[in-house]
């Protein structure tokens, strides 16, 4: 089993531009330290119809109400709201791409907290002897001897589909055939309940694919969810 | 003096708006059964909260939060966006009430 950079085709070039947008790194950095409620705020605002800041604040009284947290938590909530509104203000197609890039960047940040420097990579293919390589790269990989990991990242549960599940499970199986453990997972920036409903409908293999949902993102660090 | 809004009343209002959102999401034929299952799962969760805490008076901030969330979903016209909010709306309502999704 070996890892390789994805081909620099047109899609990769366009997507690299999206990933390099400053708002992506800023949002991912804020969300890496966020509580689950702050992450739901980001999800709601970036999916929202309106960009009225006061309206969003009233929708999240546990963050912005009189009994909400103050100090650094309040400051983070305000920063997440402002950054999410910046994303929401983009056209539908662009904001969809930016949201996907944010989930990938967030995943990479959390994984880097529990991995050696340089082990976490983006947009990588995994090659196996005698097996035709998948066209689509994995969003985020952790490349280390004996404990490699590969993740596909999605903004919403609706992104879970048979192709994604088969690609992840095939990689795990091919790795096992080479006596290489490969942990595979789906990182979904959505409630676990919604993801489970989606997964129950799939006929593709799911048993060996770890689900990391919005409430359990901190498991990527190996720590305890907040 | 009017009676305070209870959690049960608020959840009734939320579920009414959620039903409209579900109807809009069902316009995507390929996702019809998923939309139905998703809506059922979240409706059950909201109804469980109404069963457990229905008689409790809802604080004003929670009433405002749920009404604002209802305004947000009422503005949705695109069925794909409606499906996005079938995930999101129940979480917003539950968190406003201090419940876990």
Image (cartoon, coloured by chain):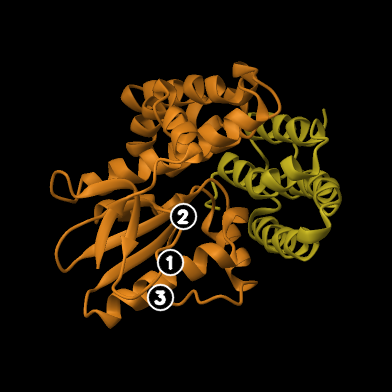
Chain colours: A orange, B yellow
Residue A98 coordinates in the image, percent (x, y): 51, 32
Q: State the CA–CA distance, disc 3 to disc 2.
A: 20 Å
Q: Is residue A67 visible?
A: no
- Measuring 53% from the left and 19% from the top, which residue is drawn there? A86
**Image location (x, y in percent) of residue A40:** 52, 40
A30 left or right of B22 in image: left
Q: Decide which of B79, A32 is in the foreground and name it.
A: B79
**Which quadrant is home to the N terminus of chain B?**
top right
Q: Nearer the viewer, mark 2 or mark 1?
A: 2
Q: Is residue A144 above or below residue A72?
A: below
Q: Which residue is mark 1?
A: A168
Q: Residues within 10 Å of mark 3 (few under 14, many from 20)?
A: some
Pick the residue in front: B72 or A14: A14
Chain bearing tag 1 is A
Q: Nearer the viewer, residue A61 or A112?
A: A112
Q: Secondary structure at mark 1?
A: helix
Q: Nearer the viewer, mark 3 or mark 2?
A: 2
- The residue sitting at 45% across, 41% down in the picture is A9
Helix, strand, or loop for circle 3? loop
Residue A226 x, y percent position in the rendering: 34, 48
User: Which residue has dot 2 on it?
Assistant: A136
Q: Which of the chains bears the disc numbered 3? A: A
Question: Mark 3 — residue?
Answer: A208
Side (left or right) of A158 relative to A120:
right
Query: The residue tagged with tag 2: helix, strand or loop?
Result: loop
Find out whether the residues at labels 1 and 3 contact each other: C-beta distance under 8 Å.
no
């Amino acid at each position: 089993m070996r890892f390789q950079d994805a081909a620099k085709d047109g899609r990769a070039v366009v997507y690299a531009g999206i990933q390099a947008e400053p708002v992506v790194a800023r949002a991912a950095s804020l969300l890496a330290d966020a509580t689950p409620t702050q992450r739901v705020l980001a999800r709601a605002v970036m999916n929202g119809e309106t960009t009225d800041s006061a309206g969003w604040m009233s929708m999240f009284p546990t963050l912005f109400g009189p009994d909400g947290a103050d100090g650094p938590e309040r400051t983070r909530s305000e920063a997440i709201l402002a950054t999410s509104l910046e994303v929401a203000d983009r056209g539908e197609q662009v904001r969809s791409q930016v949201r996907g890039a944010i989930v990938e960047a967030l995943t990479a940040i959390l994984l880097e907290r529990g991995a050696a420097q340089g082990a976490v990579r983006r947009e990588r293919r995994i090659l196996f002897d005698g097996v035709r390589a998948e066209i689509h790269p994995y969003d985020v990989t952790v490349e280390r001897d004996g404990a490699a990991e590969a993740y596909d990242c999605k903004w919403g549960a609706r992104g879970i589909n048979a192709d994604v599940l088969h690609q992840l499970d095939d990689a795990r199986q091919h790795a096992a055939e080479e006596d290489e453990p490969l942990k595979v997972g789906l990182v979904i920036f959505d409630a676990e309940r919604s993801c489970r409903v989606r997964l129950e409908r799939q006929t593709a293999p799911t048993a060996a694919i770890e689900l990391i949902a919005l409430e359990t993102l901190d498991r990527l660090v190996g720590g305890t969810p907040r | 003096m009017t009676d305070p809004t209870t959690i049960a009343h608020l959840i009734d209002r939320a579920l009414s708006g959620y039903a409209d959102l579900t109807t809009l999401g069902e316009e995507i034929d390929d996702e019809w059964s998923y939309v139905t299952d998703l809506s059922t799962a979240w409706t059950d969760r909201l109804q469980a909260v109404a069963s457990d805490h229905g008689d409790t008076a809802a604080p004003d901030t929670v009433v405002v939060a749920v009404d604002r969330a209802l305004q947000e979903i009422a503005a949705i016209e695109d069925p794909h966006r409606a499906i996005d909010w079938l995930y999101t709306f129940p979480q917003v309502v539950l968190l406003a009430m201090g419940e876990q999704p």
